[in-house]
Structure formats: structure tokens, C-alpha cells
Amino acid sequence: MYGFLDVSTSGMIAQRVRLEAASANLANQNSLLDADGNLAPYRRREVMLAPGRAGAGSAQESGGSGRSFGVQIAQISIDQSDPKPEKYDPTSPYAYKDGPYKGYVATTGINPVMENVNAMEAVRAYEANVTAAESAKQMIAATLRLIA
């Protein structure tokens, strides 16, 4: 009966995860070293969403049509592309010592503008889900008042 609340709830959870990924990307945009101090530029995280809710199995949970309500996190992927050698600084201890990129420092390739746009989009979508949940609660309350 309350599948419409599941849609908003799963949407809020998904947007929270998207915002966390964008925040992590922004926070680590200049991280070039791993935990052991080796050169390993941070790789961007991206959240992939899929329709439906994980674990929804019964016909009642799935709205009677075999489809579950809402959205789920399909996966959080890590960018596997090679680090981009964008900055030339042969004096840096992190510069490539040989090869075609000699003297260049690898960067994470994270675009802070795009990450901020992703974060703002996630916040707005979260707010829309909150508004939808509040509207659904008001409709339930109004319906119960009519019945009583």
C-alpha cells in the first residue's frame, strides 16, 4: 500500500550516495599518493543507479506487477582510465622519470566544476524526493480523516 513512499525513500538514499561520491571526488582531487605513500592518483567514483529496489520479491512489495518500486544503487564504479599527465614540473618528486611523459606530474583528472554540478543535482533530487514524501504523507492523513 505504501509503495509511493518507497519510491521517495529509495530516491533519497540514492541521492545521498551520489552526493557522498561527489564529495569524495572533490575532497581527493589533489590526492596523488596511496596509503603506503606510493604514486597512485585518486580515481573518480561514479554512482550507477538502476530501477527497482534490491530484495523486493513479493507481489505486494513489487506493486503486483513484478516490478519493484523506487531506485537502487547498481554499482559504484571507479574510473579505470590512465592518470592524465597535465602538469609539467620536472622538479616534482611525483613527475614521470622516463617515457613520453617525462617531467609531467600525473593528476587525478577530476573536474571540480562537474563534481559540483553533480553534487548540486543530487541535492536538488534529494529535495524533490523529500517534497514528494511529504505530499504523500499529507494525502494519507487526508484520506484517513475522510474515512474516520
Image: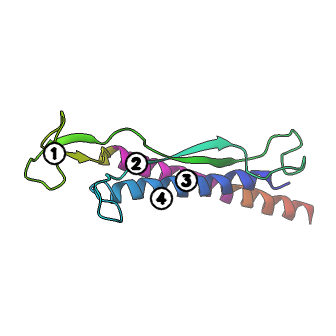
The residue type indicated by label 2 comes to: Arg
Q: Which mark is residue 97?
A: 1
Q: How many marks?
A: 4
**Residue 12, horizontal then vertical, whole percent:** 60, 56
120 magenta-colored: yes
Crowdedness of circle 4 by 10 Å Cα count: few (<14), some, many (20+)?
Answer: some
Q: Is residue 98 above or below residue 20?
A: above
x, y (%) of residue 86? 20, 40
Q: Nearer the viewer, mark 2 or mark 1?
A: 1
SS assignment at label 2: loop
**Residue indicated by mark 2:** 44
Quarter of the image that includes the C terminus: bottom right
**Alpha carbon separation for disc pair 2 and 3:** 17 Å
Earlier along the polypeptide chain: callout 4 or callout 3?
A: 3
**Any mark on residue 15, and which?**
3
Q: Secondary structure at mark 1?
A: loop
Disc 4 to disc 1, how far (Cα)?
A: 35 Å
What's the coloring here? rainbow
Q: Amino acid at mark 3?
A: Gln
First in sequence, mark 3 or 1: give its number.
Answer: 3
Residue in the image at 57% along x and 51% along y: 128
Q: Nearer the viewer, residue 114 or 142?
A: 114
Q: Along the polypeptide, which appears first: circle 2 or circle 4?
A: 4
Relative to residue 36, is residue 74 drawn left or right? Answer: right
Q: Are marks 3 and 1 in contact (CB under 8 Å)?
A: no
What's the residue at 19%, 53% (across, down)?
Answer: 94
**Residue 20 - label:** 4
Range of magenta residues: 114-134
Residue 103, position as x, y percentages in the image:
12, 43
Instruction: Out of 32 and 44, give the one closest to the viewer.
Output: 32
- Under circle 3, the secondary element is helix
Instruction: Decide which of tag 4 and tag 1 comes sooner along the chain.
Output: 4
